[in-house]
């Protein structure tokens, strides 16, 4: 199966990049007896799905970039024998709201009950919005149950999936901007925002964008495990990729770190990958090259120019000596246990998008906070856990590279100050009084803009999905011929397949792109 050329090393498959999808592909291929070599530029595998001690002198291992798991199918966990635990959060979401001078909130339990119903009633004045919520997500669940089983199979047709979904949900998500569906089904501005935000995580768009890129993002956020639940990996995100790397090595894959790929050359028989390791240049030839890097990076390695995707998130990691009290009076351990929506009313989401399009930082930054340590104390280490410390991670929306371009470091600092000020509006005590200090005496705040992600992870434009997401099915005019086309992992070169987030069903921490690329290779034979 391997291509051979004199004077070079040969393998069956060479994988460029060592993120979680690449590790999944390596594990499946090696288990099938395919000679597989993986090349990772950094000194470790894992890509964006890693854990790190971000603050000097403090043994808290934060999920530095990616932070929750929803789309990783149980089939992959079982197939690869992963030693991985995913825990459910006790709270689904908490949204602090200030209306008519009063501090209130919307609290949604993971398993909805009377607390959730009463919270909707208190916020909106009736049970109507909660009934609309239940009806909407019941319909979404039917769509999720139709789509989810197909993600580890060759691409299904859109028509086959459409027949299994409520017609208005299919039309509202697939055929017209998600903003229209949200505005039709809900009346409260904050409830609308909580629903709509799933279309904007990692996607820079208005909820009314005619391209429907926000709709595709919404779909992927709601189909995980058939429920859309986002779970906390015990041990942090690094535990996910550590388990995947162990599975790949055990199966016989050759995982090489510190290998900077310089070029990918391809002909009809296979490919040749040139890379530098320890200041020496090497070449591996193979029948197949799998790309775990972003499509724009692959194009550069192939000597081609391509458009630059646009990321749009501000990631901020915090370490706290205690959880701050909220003005609403709710127990902090309940409020912070789920997704904490900040400034995410539908009106503010759209205002922030318009400001960002104009090159300005959002005046009232929308985003979400997560306290992983309420679900998994192990990431803190015994000493910090005993002292009651906690992690917080913030994912800010509508902060594309352009809003930082004029003066990156100053504007990044300004964005962090704006975030803290927006959060303090809902707190009994300033968040600054709860922040820990690191071994150098600095406040434990780490911020990452799209530019920072591009520099650290070679993600073009800082786009966490490697580019805009695609529908996870065949469009009406698609007629796949090759295994790669059927599995949604093809490129312009027959011998180069996409195994990363840039695959047709890529995005988020799922392993789906890696699974499908491996199966396309195996199907080809």
Image (cartoon, rainbow, N blue to C red):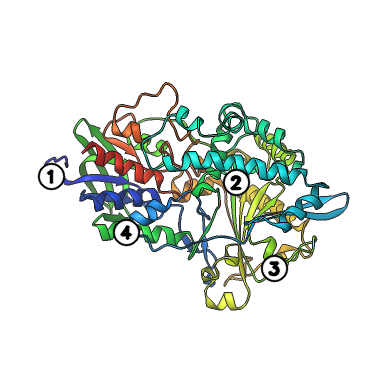
Quarter of the image with the N terminus in it: top left
Q: Residue at x 22, y 48 (%)?
A: 282
- Inspect this view and state whether residue 44 appears: no
Q: Residue at x 40, y 45 (%)?
A: 512
Which comes sooner in the sequence, label 1 or label 4? Answer: 1
Q: Residue at x 60, y 39 (%)?
A: 139
Disc 1 from disc 4: Cα separation: 31 Å
Q: Quadrant of residue 346?
A: top right
Of circles 1 and 3, the one toward us is: 3
Element class at badge 2: helix
Q: Residue at x 55, y 44 (%)?
A: 221
What residue is pinned by disc 2? 408
Is 346 or 128 nearer to us in this picture? Answer: 128
Disc 1 from disc 3: Cα separation: 60 Å
| Residues tagged 3 and 2 counted as in contact (Cβ below 8 A) | no
| Residues tagged 4 and 2 counted as in contact (Cβ below 8 A) | no
What residue is pinned by disc 1? 7
What residue is pinned by disc 4? 247
Disc 3 from disc 2: Cα separation: 27 Å
Of circles 1 and 4, the one toward us is: 4
Where is residue 330? Give x, y as percent: 76, 63
- Inspect this view and state whether residue 373 appears: yes
Q: Viewed as shown, does residue 399 lie left or right of 156?
A: right
Which comes sooner in the sequence, label 4 or label 2? Answer: 4
Element class at badge 3: loop
Disc 4 from disc 2: Cα separation: 40 Å
Q: Would you call the spot at circle 3 few (<14 residues within 10 Å), some (14-19), or many (20 or more)?
A: some
Disc 4 from disc 3: Cα separation: 40 Å
Question: Which residue is situated farthest in the top direction here?
Answer: 477
Which comes sooner in the sequence, label 1 or label 2? Answer: 1
Of circles 3 and 2, the one toward us is: 3
């Amino acid at each position: 199966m391997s291509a051979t050329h004199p004077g070079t090393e040969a393998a069956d498959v060479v994988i460029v990049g060592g993120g979680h999808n690449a590790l999944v592909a390596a594990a499946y291929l090696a288990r099938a007896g395919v000679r597989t070599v993986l090349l990772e530029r950094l000194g470790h595998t894992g890509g964006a799905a890693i854990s790190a001690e971000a603050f000097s002198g403090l043994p808290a291992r934060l999920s530095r970039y990616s932070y929750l798991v929803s789309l990783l199918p149980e089939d992959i966990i079982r197939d690869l024998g992963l030693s991985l635990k995913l825990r459910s959060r006790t709270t689904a979401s908490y949204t602090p709201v200030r209306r008519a001078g009063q501090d209130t909130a919307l609290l949604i339990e993971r398993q909805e009950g009377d607390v959730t119903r009463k919270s909707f009633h208190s916020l909106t004045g009736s049970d109507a919005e909660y009934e609309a919520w239940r009806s909407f997500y019941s319909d979404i669940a039917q769509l999720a149950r139709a789509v989810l089983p197909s993600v580890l199979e060759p691409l299904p047709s859109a028509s086959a999936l459409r027949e299994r979904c409520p017609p208005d949900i299919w039309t509202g998500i697939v055929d017209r901007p998600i903003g229209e569906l949200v505005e039709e089904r809900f009346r409260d501005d904050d409830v609308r925002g909580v629903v709509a935000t799933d279309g904007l995580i990692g996607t820079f768009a208005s909820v009314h964008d005619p391209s429907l890129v926000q709709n595709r993002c919404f779909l992927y956020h709601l189909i995980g495990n058939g429920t859309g639940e986002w779970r906390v990996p015990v041990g942090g995100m690094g535990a996910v990729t550590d388990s995947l790397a162990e599975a790949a090595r055990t199966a016989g894959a050759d995982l090489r770190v510190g290998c900077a790929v310089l070029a990918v050359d391809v002909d009809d028989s296979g490919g040749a990958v040139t890379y530098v390791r320890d200041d020496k240049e090497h070449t591996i030839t193979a029948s197949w090259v799998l790309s775990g890097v972003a499509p724009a990076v692959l194009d550069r390695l192939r000597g081609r120019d391509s458009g630059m995707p646009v990321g749009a998130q501000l990631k901020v990691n915090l370490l706290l000596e205690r959880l701050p009290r909220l003005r609403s009076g709710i127990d902090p351990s309940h409020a912070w246990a789920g997704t904490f929506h900040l400034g995410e009313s539908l009106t503010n989401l759209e205002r922030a998008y318009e400001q960002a399009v104009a090159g300005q930082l959002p005046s009232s930054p929308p985003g979400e906070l997560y306290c992983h340590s309420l679900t998994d104390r192990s990431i803190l280490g015994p000493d910090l856990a005993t002292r009651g410390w906690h992690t917080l991670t913030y994912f800010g929306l509508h902060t594309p590279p352009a809003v930082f371009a004029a003066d990156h470091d100053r504007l990044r600092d300004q964005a962090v100050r704006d975030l803290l000020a927006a959060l303090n509006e809902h707190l009994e005590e300033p968040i600054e009084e709860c922040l820990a200090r690191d071994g150098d005496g600095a406040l434990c705040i780490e911020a990452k803009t799209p530019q920072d992600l591009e520099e650290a992870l070679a993600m073009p434009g800082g786009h966490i999905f490697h580019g805009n997401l695609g529908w996870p099915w065949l469009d009406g005019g698609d007629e796949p011929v090759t295994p790669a086309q059927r599995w949604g992992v093809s490129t312009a070169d027959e011998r180069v397949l996409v195994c990363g987030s840039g695959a047709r069903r890529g995005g988020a921490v799922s392993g789906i792109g890696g699974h499908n690329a491996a199966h396309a290779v195996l199907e080809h034979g």
